[in-house]
Amino acid sequence: MTTEILFHGHSCFEINTGGKSILIDPFFTGNPAAVITQEDVNPDFIIISHGHEDHVGDSVSIAKRTGATVIANFEIVQWLEKQGVENAHPLHIGGGHQFDFGTVKLTIAHHGSSLPDGSNGGNPAGVLLKLNDGNIYHAADTGLFYDMKLIGEAGIDVAILPIGDNFTMGPEDSIKAINLIQPKKVIPCHYNTWPIINQDVAAWATSVQAQTNAEPIVLNAGEATSL
Ligand code: NI
Ligand code: MN
């Protein structure tokens, strides 16, 4: 079975693999880029990269409605439990765990992680998914860091990288990131959601083709690619 990577806008991706649906950073309500609502998704697992509102998003209500297991760092899991989420699995940076669809490992990310109500959301993370069909690295919100080279040593089939600048890496640093990670394909995210992170994604894709070995895959919300 092929693994499908479906983009829901901003930083939200749905991975459908081995009969399971995994939703990363499920931000629908208030997301200008979303084309569906939180009622339209039925994940088995939710992964939250860090505490910011545009990443925690609708996690609590989706988890309560579906019973999905939420995977996040320890501090975010403690907060989710206070919100009444029953199934949550705490991880922390550098740690991985084998779930029935594959392994989830949290990586470092250089960013913040305060939760929507101001609670401590621990340290922000990226997400490394090792699936039967290959490996996906969702860098989440981060600036460029040299250890991306180390993450790339896992063999990355698809890297999902922010390119919006201002809050995260911009297009120029994302090219350096791609050359450190050496993924086969790269999907941009965290751009054009609001004017402050607007980017020329066609120009970015041209730069990726000219300056890296990766194939750029630009998705609009609602579009998917396969692993
Ligand atoms: Ni953030
Ligand atoms: Mn963000």
Image: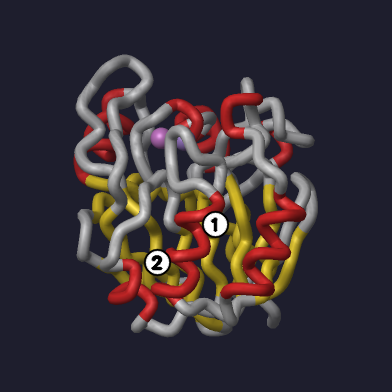
Task: Give left or right: position of 220 versus 179.
Answer: right
- Identify residue type, mark 2: Leu
Q: Residue 78 in the image: x percent, y percent?
A: 22, 34
Task: Give left or right: position of 81 versus 100.
Answer: left
Q: Give the quadrant of the C terminus.
A: bottom right
Q: Residue 21 in the image: x percent, y percent?
A: 60, 59
Task: Give left or right: position of 110 versus 157.
Answer: left
In the image, what residue occupies the spot 47% across and 59% down?
Answer: 138
> Mark 1, mark 2: which one is toward the viewer?
2
**Of the image marks 1 and 2, the number of the one nearer the N terminus:** 1
Which residue carries the number 2 mark? 128
Q: Decide: few, some or many residues near mark 2? Use Cα within 10 Å; few <14, some 14-19, many ≥20.
A: many
In the image, what residue occupies the spot 72% across and 55% down?
Answer: 203
Position of residue 94 relative to residue 131, above or below, is above
- Identify residue type, mark 1: Ile
Which residue carries the number 1 mark? 22
In the image, what residue occupies the spot 73% across and 67% down?
Answer: 225
Can the viewer see residue 151? yes
All told, the count of numbered labels is 2
Residue at far top of view = 117
Q: Are marks 1 and 2 in contact (CB under 8 Å)?
A: no
